[in-house]
Image (cartoon, helix red, strand yellow):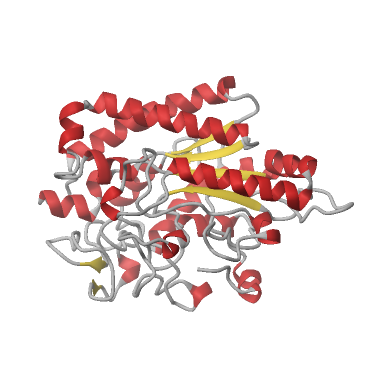
Amino acid sequence: MGRMGSAAAVAMAVVAVLCAAAVVRVRGEDTVDEDTPGASFIFGDSLVDAGNNNYLSTLSKADMNPNGIDFAASGGTPTGRFTNGRTIADIIGEMLGQADYSPPFLAPNTTGGALLNGVNYASGGAGILNGTGRVFVNRIGMDVQVDYFNITRRELDGLLGKEKAREFIHKKAIFSITVGSNDFLNNYLMPVLSAGTRVAESPDGFIDDLIIHLREQLTRLHALGARKFVVANVGPLGCIPYQKTLNRVKDDECVKLPNTLAAQYNGRLRDLLIELNAGGLPGGRFLLANVYDLVMELIANHRKYGFSTASVACCGNGGRYAGIVPCGPTSSMCDDRENHVFWDPYHPSEKANVLLAKYIVDGDSKYISPMNLRKLFKL
């Protein structure tokens, strides 16, 4: 997927990000302008993939109908986003006045001035660990995503000059990380593939590995100049249609083990970010987006938010919750997309993403801490 057309960019004023910051194209006597929308660098998995997997030979793809059916910027054609419309990243960028999408790193036109909008490195199937998602054959794991940012970083030096590029990255770029779900769903909890791992490694040991690797990845980004971070925790995996179908739980129930593991990981992630904010990575600011509690709020009170179901996928096949076969041309699709919390067996619908984004941008410390995204945006 390439960048959207300039007319659509102005009309929509959105960007595929979990956050935004202000920047102008810094050349000659131009300076970084705090009032001008700017750059976000996006790392993670299919929750925020804007089309990188379109360029991979992988089983994890969303560049086919009916994905994107409600994505106005493309006229309803698939873009590689794993939802019916905008991702939570797109919506947050729109709320913060972002001027353009952060283009997928692998898109051929992600070069030159396009880099000043930021870049999206996220990849469906990706995880913190390199082995995560191997069932999909190809994906861009977090280690490689950071490698790709290193390439972008050198290109920015050439584009702006080293000093202005450093100022741009330090002050006007925000780094969002949405990763970890696949390390459980498509690694530790995956039947057959994970059997050896689960016998050899306790939940504590596996989560230790995740935190150690994520710390290393954040440290590498910090060494490359990143200073403003938003890190999402892992949502309630036991409540997604895939897990509910697989484990045959009731409509108002979630699967306990995936939620227990997610909560355990989230506690360790919270402690890590507190440590990093206390000087573990000097000058770094780390926000924790509490996606777990946000999604649980949406599920528990879905009727209050205008949904009729928080269990059944709109697009998918298999079992009571349409939770086995991913969304694609041969999948069943509901007629009432606005009534579903989940678009497919794994991912929220656009309407759900809108509600989640509002809490992250302007919510209190229950959902985004130690400050909300709008406050970080203004720093």
Q: Residue furthest left?
A: 248
Q: Residue furthest right?
A: 29
Vertical position of residue 205 compared to residue 373: above or below: above
Residue 296 point in image, percent of width and height: 31, 45
Vertical position of residue 275 compared to residue 173: above or below: above
Q: Is residue 289 visible?
A: yes
Q: Residue at x 63, y 35 (%)?
A: 227
Q: Is residue 251 visible?
A: no
Residue 252 point in image, percent of width and height: 17, 50
**The C terminus: image quadrant:** top right
Q: Quadrant of residue 265?
A: top left
Q: Name the foreground residue: 114 vs 284.
A: 114
Number of marks present in the image shown: 0
Query: From the viewer's perspective, is 191 left or right of 308?
Result: left
Residue 267 point in image, percent of width and height: 36, 28
Q: Name the foreground residue: 204 vs 166.
A: 166
Residue 6 point in image, percent of width and height: 65, 73
Q: Quadrant of residue 8?
A: bottom right
